[in-house]
Amino acid sequence: MADLGPIVKAYDLRGVVPDELDAGIARRLGQAAAAELGGPAVVVGRDMRPSSPELAEAFTTGLCEQGVDAVDLGLCATEVVSYASGRFDLPGAMVTASHNPAEYNGLKLCRSGARSLTRDTGLAAIGARAAGPPPPPAPTPGRRRTADLADEHAAFARGFVDVAALRPLRVAVDAGNGMAVDLLPRVLDGLPVTLVPRCFTLDGTFPHHPANPLDPANLACVREAVVAEGCDLGLAYDGDADRVFCVDETGRDVASSLVVAAIAERLLARHPGATILHNAICSRVVPEVVAEAGGRPVRTRVGHSYVKAAMAEHDALFAGEHSGHYYFRENYRADSGAIATLVILEALSACDGPMSALVAPYERYASSGERSVAVADVEAALARVAGAFDGEVAVERFDGLSVDGGDWWINVRPSNTEPLLRVNVEARDEPGVDRALAQVLALVGA
């Protein structure tokens, strides 16, 4: 079999179907995962992409051929797989390519208890096993059984908030034709929330727009819905519904760092002194607010596997990323778009004003947002940035390259999933952002 290195990413397996990933490869990955993950069974879920049923079936076949049982969760959001992995203390596999276009698919894998896998802690080994000679079948094949945990998971998610404290809210939701179509109505069932749906049919060809709310262009639909329907806020989800982005009542985008700060402050009121994680790209407002609320802020690398490992190391209560991922200790340290949604609604219910008023105290800095830049030589580009600032301001190699200019900072890091550089700039004001951004883009050759 061909080298599978190209589909082994930093914290998942992902590639174009069928050029890089097909049913045959998925079957071999199932065989390899059976050996690497251990355990008597693996919980398996899938998203709504056209290729997902075939890939999930092939992966399950590979597991069973090696004597490992498969618990088929069917069509579900990624966080349902994480919940099942934690609930039953079994490894998990989710067939999805998250926010990538329809031609992509992949596997998000975890060890028992929803413990994360990275390239260095199992994914590379699975890829190497799958590319090697096929293993002999087990004397006794594994069994398949089904389990529908969607409603149980929804009830679990609602347990993170005081549902009796929620006030009537009108919420526009752009599901991006992804798994939020199934997830959100279950989670919000019985709550005083009027759902204003957009892109609310399951369709893995993404007929309306890419299911990638990190790109501001893909928030146009929810912005329009919030204003047209007089909503209190708008929410947008990625394909497998583990990320959520917000817009306020005016249709203005709310940076995820502000949401991280709002959730952190609310959770710290219940858990004084707790540790809160934020990734290297989050706004400075996050550690400031955590410290002001009596918590302990800790910076981590970008990416769910790294964040989850750091949560275990620090026994962190909560972690947030600039990319719309929110992690909760009592959710087996996994990220959850549903739980984040509920905490946002609870915080808004306790606020005297609209969504804009909720996040106003956290709007202390200007930001460029994340820019993606294609470069011919990533290391050479990073070296140019380091050389331009070294000796003048603080420069460190932490998740790419970070430069701290006092009243501004920049971070330039290689993407974990695509051949791009990610550029982030924050400063006291917009002119400061513009100056720093222009300088760093010139250095990387954009």
Image (spheres, grey):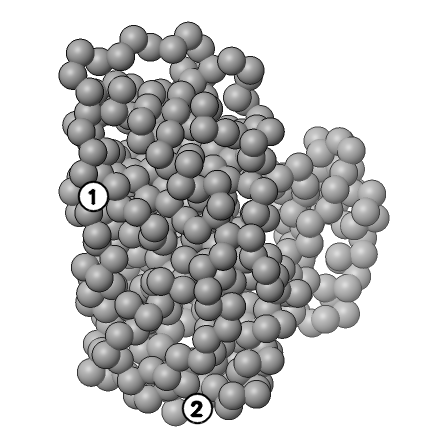
Query: Residue 81 appears at what percent x and percent y?
Result: 29, 46
Circle on res. 146: 1
Badge 1: residue crowd in 10 Å (few <14, some 14–19, many ≥20): few
Choose between 264 and 173: the one closer to the eye. 173
To which quarter of the image does residue 264 belong? bottom left
Residue 326 at least partly seen: no
Q: Are marks 2 and 1 in contact (CB under 8 Å)?
A: no
Q: Mark 2 points at which residue?
A: 353
Circle on res. 131: none
Choose between 28 and 156: the one closer to the eye. 28
Tag 2: amino acid: Gly
Residue at (59, 69) in percent of width and height: 219
Q: Is residue 198 above or below residue 8?
A: below
Q: Is residue 245 left or right of residue 64?
A: right
Residue at (77, 70) in percent of width and height: 431
Give SS at disc 2.
loop
Query: Residue 362 appears at what percent x and percent y?
Result: 50, 74
Give SS at disc 1.
strand
CA–CA distance between discs 2 and 1?
45 Å
Choose between 153 and 410: the one closer to the eye. 153
